[in-house]
Amino acid sequence: MYSSSEDYTLSITRSLITCETPYKTDDRTAILQNNILPPFNSTNTIYLTGTALTQVKISDSTFKQCGINEDGGIFRLEGKVNFTDFKSTYSDNSAIEGAIISCSGCNVTMVKSTISNN
């Protein structure tokens, strides 16, 4: 998913997003330790650019098995995007930079979220 705008709100609530990346935990560890080269993937699961008026609101959702990406296993955010998460679960996601989120200039708030095996 890609979006670029100065003023929008993206809301994801009570959703299950499984990317079904076909790699094992051992494979991910080897790639991130540079024992093997990562496959080139310049795409992102969700790539958003925006301004301080841009809102991303996530709640009670699950994101798993997204990666191996270069920047942000799930979210790549650029600009002054405001990202807020409440009670979501993130597991088995990976990227060279930012297993869950790659943030360049954005604001991130996570409350009661669960992060494991990323």
Image: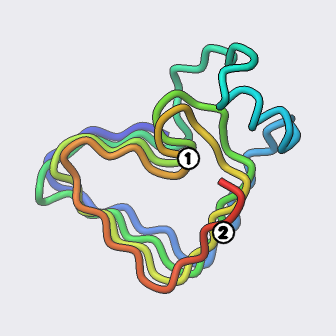
Residue 76 left/right relative to 117? left
Q: Picture quarter containing residue 63?
A: bottom right
For the rendered model, the colour scheme is rainbow
Type of residue at label 2?
Thr
Type of residue at label 1?
Ala
Residue 96 percent coordinates (x, y): 54, 31
Residue 25 percent coordinates (x, y): 83, 44
Is residue 40 positioned above or below 7 on the image? above
The crowding category of the residue bearing disc 1, from other C-alpha atoms within 10 Å (few below 14, some 14 to 19, many at least 20), is many
Residue 6 left/right relative to 107? left
Q: Picture quarter containing residue 61?
A: bottom right
Is residue 90 positioned above or below 19 on the image? below
Q: Secondary structure at mark 1?
A: loop
Residue 5 left/right relative to 69? left
Residue 86 left/right relative to 50? right
Residue drawn at 37 percent across, 61 percent down:
10
Residue drawn at 23 percent across, 61 percent down:
107
Residue drawn at 35 percent across, 71 percent down:
84
Is residue 107 positioned above or below 30 on the image? below
The circle drawn on residue 99 is 1
Residue 117 percent coordinates (x, y): 71, 58
The circle drawn on residue 62 is 2
Residues marked 2 and 1 touching at CB (< 8 Å):
no
Q: Nearer the viewer, residue 78 or 13?
A: 78
Q: Nearer the viewer, residue 94 or 21?
A: 94
